[in-house]
Image: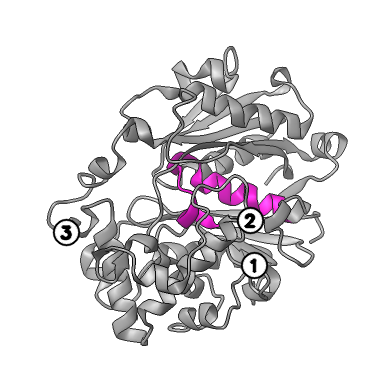
Amino acid sequence: MKRNVAIIGGGQTYHAARRHDVDQAEMVNEAVRAALKDARMTIDEIDLVILGNMEFFEGVHLTDCWLVHGSGAYGKQGVKITTGGTVGATAVCAGAHHVASGLFDKVLCIGFEKQEEGDTGAILSGVANPLWGRSMAGAAVGYFAMMGSSYIANWGATEEHSAMVAVKARQNARKNKYAHLKLDITIEDALNSRMLAWPIRMLDMCPASNGACAMILADEKTAKARSKKPVWIRAMETAHNEQFELDWRDVKTERLIFSKAAAGRLYRKLGVDDPAKYFDVFEIYEPATWAELIWYEDLGLCGPGEGFRLIEQGKTNIDGPIPVNPSGGVLSTNCIGASAMLRVWEAALQIRGDAGEHQVPKDVRRAMTTAYGGTNWTVMTALSKTLED
């Protein structure tokens, strides 16, 4: 990149199933004000505003235009981004490139979703081909059910392993004051939750959340002058492909090439041979428990068929050697337009040492984040405490 780029501020709303106290603009404004306060800036200093949202989930379009009084974009350069569940990370990626290119010095990135004002499940049921993508029906529950059943059949994992992921996520969320589902659950609670499509149960899936996240990116000169704790964006990768139902019948096949491809390219950029040792924390976009187990493997944290062993041995716990989603992850908070940005912001908080009760108990110098959207899309971001890390 032409110029180094840093995260110099950020903020998020409290996330919940209902936010009847605010409209969309007011909810977005909460996150924007928090980000400006964190960066010790005013909106007048922002050069560009990037707004990310899955607008058809709420059924209201042109959100970048009619939310200007909440986003602070009035009279400024602006970009609207919609790329499925990846949208929050895509906004960060676009913001970083605008800064790195030299076009702008300070960019405000915003992601939000107010799902209570629409019907996300109904929209998702109609996004795929009715034949080849029929497993996407029912808000993608069938999609992840095929993933889980294939994983069980091929590697010998059990429903208890997915329940361990569910418990880890919700117990971590209890430490995160902004999280949506702060559930004090056990493995038995997860296994006894309502069956949706075997082996997916209610507690194996993410919630429908309302909330927003905002981040301010800046060039190196601005970051060093304005921020005491800049977090540097060291590398980014994007990979999209269309996944069809047949690809899930055997997890031993070359599946999920999007995540493997993006991770491989990002690791090569950084010269990473062992990501589990190189990165101190991971914030990954896991809409379902089985996805987390599989993506341990696709990200190179372990070998094929060993993902369930990591959770079994507690290695990805908040106090483990490979902490994954200390924030509670998407399994605990899923305001779709903001979910991927929250992964980046939560990772930045870990590097700054500002994550509060869900701060991992070790020095965090490097972090890795992922996004997930569509049928198999991702944006991956590597962050570091210094430019030398």
Q: Is residue 124 left or right of residue 212?
A: left
Q: Which mark is on residue 122? A: none
On screen, residue 34 above or below 206: above
Is the residue marked by circle 1 packed among few (<14), some (14-19), or many (20+) residues within 10 Å?
Answer: many
Measuring from the top left, give residue 88's x and y in whole percent. 51, 42
Using the numbered discs, state the Cα–Cα distance from disc 1 to disc 2 in whole angstroms: 11 Å
Disc 3 secondary structure class? loop
Using the numbered discs, state the Cα–Cα distance from disc 3 to disc 1 in whole angstroms: 39 Å
> To which residue does mark 3 refer?
132
> To which residue does mark 2 refer?
175
Q: Quadrant of the C terminus?
A: bottom right
On screen, residue 3 above or below 373: above
Q: Along the polypeptide, which appears first: circle 3 or circle 1? A: 3
Q: Nearer the viewer, mark 3 or mark 2?
A: 2
Q: Nearer the viewer, mark 1 or mark 2?
A: 2
Q: Amino acid at mark 3?
A: Trp
* Residue ID at (81%, 54%): 386
Q: Along the polypeptide, which appears first: circle 3 or circle 2? A: 3
Measuring from the top left, give residue 329's x and y in whole percent. 53, 56
Query: What residue range appears in magenta?
Result: 328-350
Q: Is residue 354 magenta?
A: no
Q: Residue furthest left?
A: 131
> To which residue does mark 1 refer?
318
Q: Is residue 32 left or right of residue 257?
A: right
92 or 23: which is nearer to us? Answer: 23
Is the residue marked by circle 2 packed among few (<14), some (14-19), or many (20+) residues within 10 Å?
Answer: some
On screen, residue 51 above or below 358: above
Disc 1 secondary structure class? loop
On screen, residue 109 above or below 189: above
* Residue ID at (53%, 39%): 91
Q: Quadrant of residue 310?
A: bottom right
Residues at circles 1 and 2 in contact by the CB criterion of under 8 Å: yes
